[in-house]
Amino acid sequence: MGINNTPTPKIIDNLQLLVDNVLDPLRMHWGRPMIVTSGYRSQRLNTVVHGATQSQHLTGQAADIRTVSDDRDENMKLLRMLVSLKLPFDKLIAEYVDGQGRPDWIHVSFSPLKRGIKLTCKNGKYLHGIRC
């Protein structure tokens, strides 16, 4: 899209914290690669992709992930693992779940708050909690 998406040093620090505290530990337990479909997004890029105005992607604190196969059953296994490991996430969202609750992708963030918020996005609506 030709949009400058260069992170600042502070955003790079936030990305490193996300990787160190959530993504790498998850990948190590998963035992195989994962795909990050979205990480840091500049304000302009976030607007173009219709991201939330207060998205943690803007600060480098969030990533959208999925399995290499992009199979909903595999994405659900990855989500279950992330929950069972009790990693210090700030927000975890099972995104665009199907009728069986299997996510299309997983949004996970890390911030010093470590709130442990769990949400499910179904039919474009965000519901509290995750069923996995």
Image (spheres, grey):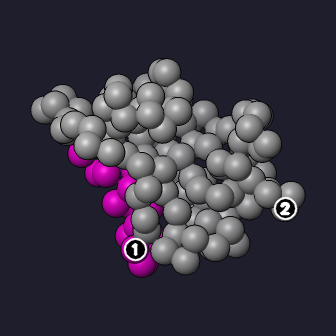
Q: Quadrant of residue 2?
A: top left
Q: Quadrant of residue 126?
A: top right
Range of magenta residues: 14-33
Q: Is residue 93 a member of the stretch shown in magenta?
A: no
Residue extending farthest to the right is 99
Q: Secondary structure at mark 2?
A: loop
Q: Which residue is mark 1?
A: 33
Which one is earlier in the sequence, the residue at label 1 or at label 2?
1
Split into 4 quadrants, where in the image is the N terminus?
A: top left
For the stretch drawn in magenta, the main secondary structure is helix
Percent across and percent down for residue 59 are: 33, 29
Q: Amino acid at mark 2?
A: Gln
Q: Pick the residue in front: 56 or 30.
A: 56
Q: Pick the residue in front: 4 or 118.
A: 4
Q: Is residue 68 visible?
A: yes
Q: Is residue 88 visible?
A: no
Q: Is residue 21 a member of the stretch shown in magenta?
A: yes
Q: Quadrant of residue 100?
A: bottom right
Residue extending farthest to the left is 9
Q: CA distance from mark 1 to mark 2?
A: 25 Å
Q: Residue at x 44, y 56 (%)?
A: 37
Percent across and percent down for residue 24 are: 34, 60
Q: Which residue is mark 2?
A: 100
**Numbered disc total:** 2
Horizontally, residue 112 falls left or right of residue 30, namely left
